[in-house]
Image: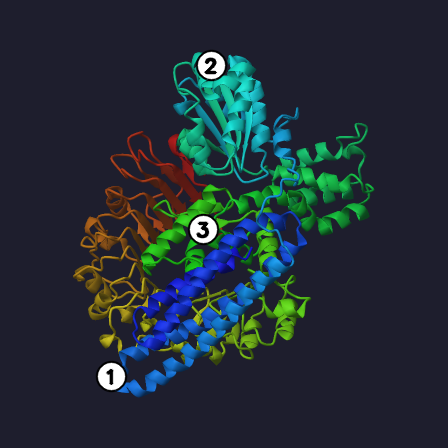
Amino acid sequence: MAEILLTAIINKSVEIAGNLLLQEGSRLNWLKEDIDWLQREMRHIRSYIHDAKDKAIGGNSRVKNLIKDIQELTGDVDDLLDEFLPKIQQSNKCKGSICRLKTACIPSHASFVDEFAIEIEKVNKRVADIDRVRTTYNIMDTSNNNNDCIPLDQRRLFLHADETEVIGLDDDFNKLQAKLLDQDLPYGVVSIVGMPGLGKTTLAKKLYKHVRDQFECSGLVYVSQQPRAGEILHDTAKQVGVTEEERKDNLEGNLRSLLKRKRYVILLDDIWDVEIWNYLKLVLPEYDSKIGSRIIITSRNSNVGRYIGGDFSVHVLQPLDSENNFELFSKKIFNFDNNNSWANASPDLVNIGRSIVGRCGGVPLAIVVAPGMLRARERTGHAWNRVLESMGHKVQDGCAKVLALSYNDLSIALRPCFLYFGLYPEDHEIRAFDLTNMWIAEKLIVVNSGNRREAESLAEDILNDLVSRNLIQVAKMAYDGKISSCRIHDLLHSLCVDLAKESNFFHTEHNAIGDPDNVARVRRITFYSDDNAMNEFFHLNPKPTKLRSLFCFTKDCCIFSQMAHFNFKLLQVLVVVTSRDYYQHVTFPKKIGNMNCLRYVRLEGRIRVKLPNSIVKLKCLETLDIFHSYSKLPFGVWESKKLRHLCYTKELYCVFFVSPFYRIMPPNNLQTLMWVDDKFCEPRLLHRLINLRTLCIRDVSGSTIKILSALSPVPKALAVLKLRFFKNTSEQINLSSHPNIVELGLFGFSAMLLNIEAFPPNLVKLNLVGLMVDGHLLAVLKKLPKLRKLTLLRCRHDAEKMDLSGDSFPQLEVLHIEDAHGLSEVTCMDDMSMPKLKKLLLVQGPIISPISLRVSERLAKLRI
């Protein structure tokens, strides 16, 4: 899997070449020739690896050794580029001052250009040596041998097996059957989609066998990841009744002619992409016609189902709940022993069985694998406990081939982005904001134009693609339909960890330790919980110069003391998440100023830390995110031209200093600024933040309200504004001249000062926290024309009953009321109000005497 590193090298080569275009001079031209040669060579090697990987997967040891040599080479080349990129960028600055300091710049250029040329020559020799090994030892890595055995496709056999028993999917089956037999079914297609191992094929087989007698002809066909259209059509034709002679004479024409006359149902199992469908649909005639023919498909990719049958066709299969998990597990355990059951088992054995089922995460494939590990064991607590302790990898091994198919189907560009999920602990909710910015920081995503917005858009597309492939689960959606946060299933998380270790993409706290040579080559490492493993790792790797990413999910913040002693010159991403219940005082090492490649820093948890002045030296820093921590920032951090996101999400305790030199600051790339002091807000400064999208201000005063209300010209990019008020103010807010703001948050503001002009005209999401909600405010909110999500948190209500009836909330989709003080009932008695409401969330907060909110009949149906 050296393709990941090769792609990174190619991406970085593109960026370096772009930097060199800004410069002139014979030596730099030679440097560009070296970079161009390197990029071409890496592209050829990547194609070579792609062709050779099937041989390596098949167990060819010589090919595996060759790929390992290539992987080591690519790792060293990646290090080389990361080391020289800052020097090239610095030479750009030197060029800008060449008129003032010409004699000092040229020797510097000459030095690193010559040094780079020497390193490229070493790479050239290693490439030649790898080719010598390949030819000398006759390594047949990319050619096909006619004598090779064709592997048995077990999925094809399973499709025609008799077993169609479905446990825990009765509701899914009933919904699908009703949809399939609906005369008005659009396109006549039912699409069953979901992550690997959920039982899509089993469910589809049961549905197909249950309804096929209601059709004149039927066919059940396996498509596969590498489909052969001719075989699929031949298999279909044979099953629906096309004679052998007709199949030989004119397969497509005779099959189409027969299906045109008859009402048919065909199950197409395991469709991976739309290309094969675009061919098959030319032969399958008018399957949505009055005749009532039907197509059933299964796919791991929701977009495939959506493409074939539209949104209505898609049925997303979910993991089983705990009781159905246990029922399936029990059936498999006692399948060959009709005289035994849990009634004859000890309570300990039942509890261990439930623990084993819990480890399977509701995936039937894993639940079926687990009993196979237990049947050969004695039915004792000791024997089963040993299986429980070791079952993680054993279940993963049993499911690996099925899960790996989804990974192998990913493009080279998507693979490292998927593996990145394994850097987080199991069942961790991951913000999309973090993922996309880390992908960009590590240059896993690079666009030729160098345009940051284009890179962010591509990152968003990649995340959506992983979700549509059902490799990633959406945890929360944003108001605009974008993914806010996501999770990865434990089985797929284990797959990420195993594949990442194999390719040296990243290591966990345990699998990096053992081989000293391997420890020294670790590029990314994550510590989920074990501080001892962290200490051992740095003891074995006293010069972690190859580290690109360091993730620490820990109770103690000992990582900061480790960083004070070591050189992390290539570190690009630093994430420290602590779970202590109390604040820890830590000292951030001054050496952070030497981490020239650091682009993304996230500190989360109860940490009190003062960032050193040396942080201003981080010219590449793009994201500084301090979550639930107390920190002081030195002057000038936010003035960095590359800094895009400066986030404080512990609003009450942040201390944010504004440089006295901001008045001469040029327009910068800052996009996110959360939470800053009220003193920060001056028109001259806000006008310079031309790319600002999110602005959050604390301790808002009347003067800041005046500035925001009268701000002109309005920052075009500003879409999210959050204001926290510490004291009451008599100033009336007016945001009606801010058409681009779509999300607004007001914390502790006086509701008496809010009228319709207080809200932006295109407001979509509104959060009101700690306000007094009275009839005046409610009347204003009802009139907001584009509001889709309204949250009222810890608000006081002047009336026990909130009546939402009348001409109100024309676009509202989600209403969230939490910890409401003084409110006991929410009603809406007519069907005209809130016509688009989909969700009602009523959550009682931690008050002494919680009141159970009553809702009217209509709202009760929408409550979740």
* Label 3–label 1 contact, CB within 8 A: no
**Relative image position of residue 37 (x, y in whole percent):** 43, 65
Question: How is colour applied across the structure in the image?
Answer: rainbow
Q: Nearer the viewer, mark 2 or mark 3?
A: 2
Image disc number at residue 225 = none
Q: What amino acid is at disc 2?
A: Leu
Say if 587 sits above or below 265 in the image: below
Give the spatial CA distance, label 2 vs label 1: 81 Å
Q: What amino acid is at disc 1?
A: Cys
**Relative image position of residue 376 (x, y in whole percent):** 80, 40
**Relative image position of residue 198 (x, y in whole percent):** 58, 37
Q: Front-most of 365 and 248? A: 248
Say if 726 sits above or below 752 in the image: below
In which quadrant will I find the C terminus? Answer: top left
Q: Report which residue position mark 3 lands on.
A: 485
Q: First in sequence, mark 2 or 1: give its number.
A: 1
Q: Front-most of 233 and 559? A: 233
Q: Report which residue position mark 1 lands on.
A: 99
Say if 419 sits above or below 785 in the image: below
Q: Front-most of 793 and 459? A: 459
Residue at position x 31%, y 33% in the image: 835
Q: Report which residue position mark 2 lands on.
A: 258
Which image quadrant is residue 672 in?
A: bottom left
Q: Secondary structure at mark 2?
A: helix
